[in-house]
């Protein structure tokens, strides 16, 4: 994954406007009417997390208008260095919910017991936060990957899915574009996983940009495998809607047809090297779009 610094005037105004409602803060972008269910993957503001701390990030995100967040900061039983209950309260104090988390562990035959114990602790922490989803955002696929490796990972994901299900949490896998570079049994690695995990215990969080960059059509996958996609990453080359490469309308229309309720903006690169401005621009684009729900 590509690597995920000073606020411009707009960001400064957002941080200063603590008593202003989020809808007003985004009104310059033209948003109006009922607040939309727009989530943010907090990796989008990873440098701000490092520089200013997660509290300031959550305040900023809430003022933009985002309603829910997906984390990328789990480590050793804590979320962004905080006890799970403390982090949950911090999010909810901003009027948002933490509904999903990205976290991952590689596995080998020799590390299975250790890795599964790691997941047990992670599930306990995420259950305290109250997430709906725990998502592994990566797996090692390269020129040396074998069909046996793919089978091992499909079984691994299924095993983790059984564990999370016991805590009423769904386990998922998030793609990049490399899953469309390699084939196994004549199928893309992505399709191999889709076909070989337990569909009752593993869902897929489609990253629509990376599917497109892999040369495939996200709408086609959403139509053909509707039941396997419970959550979506809305992403573009930089800010949402800025590249002109992504046609988001049919994606959202199919998401709505599939009754997908949980989706998250992720911004990995920034036109002006200003993450806050880019994340706000992405929100404004989606808030104005008639097809976004």
Image (cartoon, helix red, strand yellow):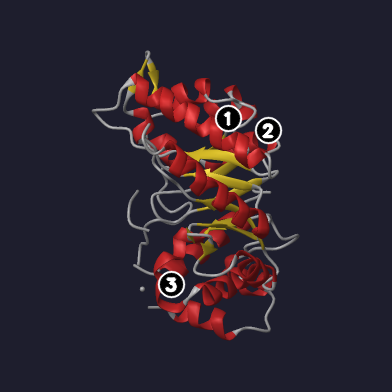
Name the residue rendered at 43%, 36% in the picture.
112
Dot 3 or dot 2, earlier in sequence: 3
- Residue most extreme to the top: 185
Which mark lies nearer to you, 3 or 2?
Answer: 3
Name the residue rendered at 44%, 38% in the picture.
175
Q: Say the numbered circle drawn on residue 279.
A: none
Q: Is residue 282 above or below residue 252?
A: below
Residue at disc 2, secondary structure? loop
Q: Is residue 224 above or below residue 245?
A: above
Q: Position of residue 48 (x, y in %)?
A: 43, 72
Q: Which residue is mark 1?
A: 222
Name the residue rendered at 58%, 30% in the picture.
222
Q: Which residue is mark 3?
A: 48
Q: CA distance from mark 3 to mark 1?
A: 33 Å
Contact flag, marks 2 and 1 (Cβ < 8 Å): yes
Q: CA distance from mark 3 to mark 2?
A: 34 Å
Q: Is residue 149 left or right of residue 265?
A: left
Estimate how packed mark 1 is, as few (under 14), some (14 to 19) or many (20 or more) residues with alpha carbons within 10 Å: many
Q: Is residue 38 left or right of residue 105?
A: right
Q: Image quadrant of residue 159?
A: top right
């Amino acid at each position: 994954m590509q690597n995920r610094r000073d606020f411009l005037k707009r960001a400064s105004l957002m941080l200063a406007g603590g008593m202003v409602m989020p809808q007003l803060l985004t009104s310059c972008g033209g948003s109006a009417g009922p607040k939309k269910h727009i989530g943010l993957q907090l990796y989008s503001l990873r440098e701000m997390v490092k520089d200013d701390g997660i509290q300031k990030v959550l305040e900023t995100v809430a003022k933009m208008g985002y309603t829910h967040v997906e984390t990328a900061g789990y480590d050793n039983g804590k979320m962004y260095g905080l006890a799970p209950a403390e982090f949950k309260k911090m999010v909810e104090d901003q009027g948002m919910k933490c509904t999903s988390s990205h976290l991952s562990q590689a596995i080998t035959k020799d590390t299975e017991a250790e890795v599964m114990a790691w997941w047990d602790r992670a599930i306990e922490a995420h259950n305290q936060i109250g997430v709906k989803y725990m998502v592994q955002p990566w797996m090692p696929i390269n020129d040396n990957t074998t069909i046996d490796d793919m089978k091992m990972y499909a079984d691994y994901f299924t095993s983790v899915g059984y564990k999370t299900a016991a805590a009423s949490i769904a386990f998922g896998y998030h793609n990049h574009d490399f899953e469309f570079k390699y084939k196994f049994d004549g199928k893309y690695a992505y399709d191999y996983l889709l076909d070989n995990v337990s569909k009752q215990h593993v869902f897929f969080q489609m990253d629509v940009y990376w599917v497109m960059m892999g040369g495939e059509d996200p709408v086609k996958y959403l139509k053909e495998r509707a039941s396997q996609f419970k959550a979506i990453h809305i992403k573009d080359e930089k800010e949402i809607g800025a590249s002109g490469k992504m046609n988001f309308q049919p994606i959202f229309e199919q998401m709505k047809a599939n009754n997908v309720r949980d989706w998250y903006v992720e911004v990995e690169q920034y036109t002006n090297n200003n993450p806050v401005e880019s994340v706000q621009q992405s929100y404004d684009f989606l808030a104005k779009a008639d097809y976004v729900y």
